[in-house]
Amino acid sequence: MIDVDAVDFFMNGRVLHSPYEYLAAMRARCPVRREPHHGVFMVTGYDEAVQVYNDTERFSACISVTGPFPGFPVPLDGDDVSATIAAYRARLPMSDQLPTLDPPVHTDHRALLARMITPKRLKENEEFMWRLADRQYDEALADGRVEFNGAYAGPFAMLVIADLLGVPESNHEEFHEAFYGGQAGTIGSTNGESLPHTPLGYLYEKFTAYVEDRRREPRGDVLTGLASATFPDGSTPDLMDVVRVASNLFAAGQETTVRLLSSAVMILAENPELQAVLRANHELIPSLVEETLRWESPVRGDFRLAKVPVTVGGVDIPAGSTLMLLNTAANRDPRKFPAPDTFDILRPNARSHIAFGRGAHACPGAPLARAEAVVSLTRLFERTSNFWIDEDKHGPAGARRYRYLPTFMLRGLTRLHLEYSA
Ligand code: HEM
């Protein structure tokens, strides 16, 4: 069995590529266990992760997306570090982004988001997805071979969010160019300092202009709704609050969704029998999506900081400790999901996975991501009669070469080369 303490989960390339043996070994020792390299409490148990996700009293999300790096700016001493967190949180990376906020600020910003993404908006957005999938597959499916992530999933996920936020379709080409025309990196990147040369910088510029314009001259469109959304107490948010929430949707909703789509398509390309079953039974597509989320959770995990001493899974955790809630591990906890390493679309409780987190920060984009997957797979089945892995690019069955995103935050393929017949 793997020597878990010898492995630095955050830096080890082999574990990055293939994390499940390490995570199972870690859980077998204890579902909550401190790894020795960075002192992070690794929460690999399902119930334990859910407990922490649901506890905003005793855990702060201020390090949600960065974890142990670069580390808290001052020592976190004492039995209650809440005041230290409050005093220094602005110095942490991404401190203005929704996932890192704590109540009561988080509660207000989350309510603002809920006013922007109304059920009506989600429904209109889903209608747009079907048209967009057609358009995107028209471009992507040309000569029997396709790199699915770059040609389809990336542009699709980005334009879905653009539409959700009301970016006029006449501006979609410009967004596509800004994200995929070579001048921008990945939106998930955290180097927001070098604005405006990052996607986040581009988004800040665009949404500042949109919101300023709609506040000056309301037009009755979606962007006007965004610009005039208020906090629960009725107060109008600062321009930058709106811009940040809107931009955060792109940051949170793009790379994640691309990984979900490519994992699902890869699983189908690798399993011709399963593909045939799904082609003949489109009503099973949502089950495939849930099992994919459980089996290859696109967000490996989220971090929390213990404000006070706390016990999780019988383990005492001192105030000031960093915890990683490993969705990828909790979703394969055999106490919750029997035979967890088997991919089974008929698994009765697949939907209880925590790929979208839990509690106050649980993913508000979950319905969107699910719909994107269903639309994309349905149309892919309609546009092809079969698709399989391109062996020239990924090697033969049994000796595939797949590359995964080089980050401990996300799990998914960098590229997915397919061949298909129409
Ligand atoms: C398969 C796709 C997706 C996965 C697996 C995923 C996963 C997650 C997870 C695990 C969290 C919780 C973070 C935490 O507790 O620290 C989260 C939060 C969030 N997600 Fe998603 N997400 C996906 C798609 C999306 C989409 C499409 C959007 C937007 C349109 C989105 C927007 C957000 C936002 C804004 C947050 C922060 C919420 C908060 O802090 O209150 N996500 N997501």
Image: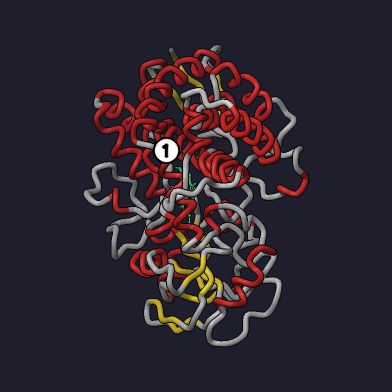
**What x and y, as percent, mark residue 130?**
40, 20
Residue reaching furthest to the left: 348
In the image, what residue occupies the spot 63% across and 80% down?
76
The amino acid marked with disc number 1 is Ile
- From the image, which quarter does the C terminus lie in? top left
In the image, what residue occupies the spot 71% across and 34% down?
184
| Residue behind label 1 places its C-beta within 8 angstroms of ligand 1 | yes
**What x and y, as percent, mark residue 287?**
29, 39
Local secondary structure at mark 1? loop
**What x and y, as percent, mark residue 271?**
38, 34
The front one of 302 and 273 is 302
Residue for badge 1: 117
* In the image, residue 247 above or below residue 302: above
In the image, what residue occupies the spot 41% across and 53% down?
362
In the image, what residue occupies the spot 48% across and 75% down?
33
Res 328 seen here: no
Res 284 seen here: yes
Other-residue count near label 1 (Cα within 10 Å), few / some / many at <14 / 14–19 / ≥20: some
Image position of 315 (left or right of 252): left
Image position of 417 (left or right of 70): left
- The quadrant holding residue 255 is top right
The front one of 387 and 412 is 412
